[in-house]
Image (cartoon, rainbow, N blue to C red):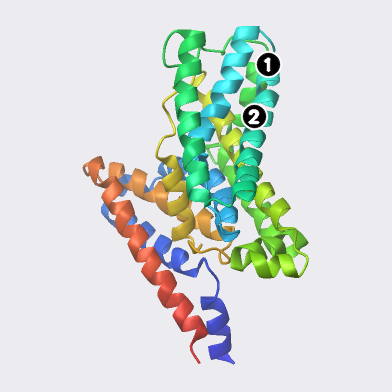
Amino acid sequence: MQRSVWRRLLARPEVGALIAAIGVYVFFFSVAPSFREAGSLATVLYQASVMGIMAIPVALLMIGGEFDLSAGVAVTTSALTAAILSFQLTVNVWTGVFVALIVSLAVGAFNGWLLIKTGLPSFLVTLGSFLILQGSNLAVTKIFTGNVASDSISDMDGFDQAKSVFASEVSIGGVDFKVTVFYWLAFAAIATWLLLRTRFGNWIFAVGGNKDSARAVGVPVNFTKIALFMGVGAGAWFVGMHLLFSFNTVQSGEGVGNEFLYIIAAVIGGCLLTGGYGSAVGPVIGAFIFGMVSQGIVYANWNPDWFKAFLGVMLLIAALVNLWVRHQATRR
């Protein structure tokens, strides 16, 4: 009976990431005294939340068997849409926010629709979207502003209200936590419920495992894939709004490369590159590891150039741990 419980525990996708997260936390807790402070934890959680909010829908998409390489620049596209539209039309910033949501969902829907219509791998489809968005972000911003950044919207109607929604802080015990931390955890809870307690969650696992078999038993494969891509678009919109209302302006070249960090967080969290396996809790833990590493290196006074190397090592270790965990869970 004990062995059965142990195997069920190992079968959870996020177990390997949890073990790694504990190890990383203990390591930086021991080598970096400033890492132990409550304010440092708030900073780590903030870094993790910005990454994790996007890692969750990216993980769901990966469970569904697809990738989105445009996710990083899509965040910037969303922020630029809201900023440029609001400033150029001198309208309430909420108008820009809602138009940005429509644009972000449309980008996701386009990726899913093109994937289904052409049969091309999502790698190629979203690589094309990545290049289109990257070039458009820079070109459109230069057309309207004359430089590579959007104009500041901090003095426009609705800015303060939008900032309180997307970029405010919550004080707990004298420590200020960014509101994104709470959104991150809420989105993780919703995604977990969606995966484990709804029909749509079953569809996600089914299309990621074998889409032909899923279609044969009545799963709406096309709808599920398009919805998953639109979920990534919704995540990009939310993070884009946070960045816009945190810094008042947006650099058009931002976001390039972040798509790989989202995928890394999902893989560290136990998602398979082949689809059909993973959880919503896993990418939360993966993003937390990202936050601990990115800030822990700073608190330990190490050369930050080692960050990507450390992240690469973590990715390989996570892949090996996940392989071992699945092997242990399926042993007879």
Residue 167 position within the rendered picture, expressed as x and y whole percent measured from the top left: 57, 29
* Label 2 with label 1: CB-CB less than 8 Å: no
Residue flagged by tag 2: what amino acid is it?
Val
Q: Is residue 118 left or right of residue 92?
A: left
Q: Viewer-proximal residue, 197 or 6?
A: 197
Residue 7 position within the rendered picture, expressed as x and y whole percent measured from the top left: 53, 83
Eyeballing the image, is 103 above or below 59? above
Q: Give the alpha-carbon distance from disc 2 to disc 1, as whole Å.
A: 20 Å
**Circle 2: is it few (<14), some (14-19), or many (20+) Cα within 10 Å?**
many
2 or 1: tag closer to the N-terminus: 2
Q: How many callouts does the rendering have? A: 2
Residue flagged by tag 1: what amino acid is it?
Gly
Q: In this view, does 225 lie to the left or right of 254?
A: right
Quarter of the image containing the N terminus?
Answer: bottom right
Residue 32 position within the rendered picture, expressed as x and y whole percent measured from the top left: 28, 49
- Residue at (40%, 42%) from the top-left corner? 40
Q: Can residue 229 be seen in this view?
A: no
- Residue at (60%, 55%) from the top-left corner? 60
Q: Is residue 142 left or right of residue 297?
A: right
Q: Viewer-proximal residue, 309 or 71?
A: 71
Residue 82 badge: none
According to the picture, the residue beneath numbered tag 2 turns out to be 103
Eyeballing the image, is 253 above or below 30? above
According to the picture, the residue beneath numbered tag 1 turns out to be 158
Q: What element carries label 2?
A: helix
Single out the residue that lies furthest toward the left.
Answer: 303
**Circle 1: is it few (<14), some (14-19), or many (20+) Cα within 10 Å?**
some
Q: Can residue 80 be seen in this view?
A: yes
Q: What element carries label 1?
A: loop
- Residue at (66%, 60%) from the top-left corner? 204
Depth-wise, is mark 2 or mark 1 nearer the camera? 2
